[in-house]
Image (cartoon, rainbow, N blue to C red):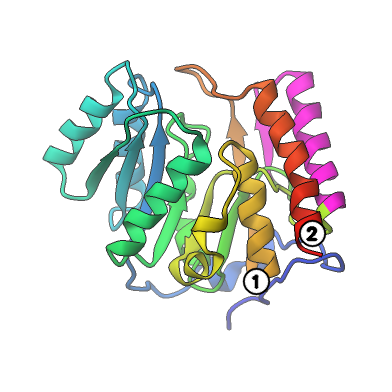
Amino acid sequence: MPPRRARYGSDAPCPPCLEHMENVVNAEPHEDRPLVVMPTYNEAENLERIVTAALEAAPRLHLLVVDDGSPDGTGAIADRLAAADPRVHVLHRTAKEGLGRAYVAGFRWGLERGYDKLIEMDADFSHDPGYLPTMLDLSNHYDLVIGSRYVQGGGTSDWSLSRRAISRGGGLYARTVLGVGIQDLTAGFMCWRAALLNQLDLDRIGAAGYGFQIEMKYRAVQRGAAVIEFPIHFPDRTAGVSKMSSSIFTEALALVWKLRLSSR
């Protein structure tokens, strides 16, 4: 018997954690077509290792690298990996237009080719590939599965106090303004069912930066999607350079009021 379908809203209960998910993670194998969408910009130090680790953790996956014209040769590495493994694909874009635009391009690519589960995943090992099997199992019962830092059992490491405060405070602010129960609104490690993505009308997604993660989850909740968060450990990257900036954070804070007002 699958677990209760959690629909998050202003009156939603706390999201379930792994100890309540035995029937999900032990579910029978489900034939599906999952695709990891992995945006990259200057990830030459990480790309081959993360692609190898993801495909070893969940061999039935396919993986799409969406490279925004990285000057460090990331795109060429992606092409080499794709030539060696039919599960790896590459979408080259000519300019760095933001995380949201890269994901939307990747989602469209996957939906056009009939993938029925689309996973957002970073290339810097902040998203541990070891969580992929659990995520895929949960996606048999939920429209959106979120790898969450802020439910029981989740957490971060190697973060400064200021980064922790900004992440926690920004999440609380967004949840309060939007009136949703998702604990990690800015999470970027997620699995979407294709049917839900098709309902969201990707042309309407306005946020280009990290606010994209907030907007997508909010629109999913508005659609009545069955959403679950499961705990993950989120370390800081050890190679490459973070793309986070103060302007990205400011964009996300302004976005929540735009979303709230537009839903009235």
State which quarter of the image contains the N terminus. Answer: bottom right
Q: Name the spot of residue 85 as percent of width and height, x first.
A: 16, 44
Residue bearing mark 2: 180
Q: Identify the residue at image location x=59%, y=48%.
A: 206
Q: Is residue 145 above or below residue 246?
A: below
Q: Is residue 61 magenta?
A: no
Q: Name the spot of residue 22 as percent of width and height, x first.
A: 59, 68
Q: Identify the residue at image location x=85%, y=64%.
A: 10
Q: CA distance from mark 1 to mark 2?
A: 13 Å
Sooner in the amino-acid sequence: mark 1 or mark 2? 2
Please report the bounds of the magenta region as a residue range.
154-177
Q: Is residue 224 above or below residue 243?
A: below
Q: Is residue 167 magenta?
A: yes
Q: Amino acid at mark 1?
A: Arg
- 219 with respect to 98 (left or right): right
Prevailing secondary structure class for the magenta stretch in the rendered image: helix
Secondary structure found at label 2: loop
User: Looking at the rendered structure, which numbered label has been put on residue 64?
Assistant: none
Residue 18 seen by the camera: no
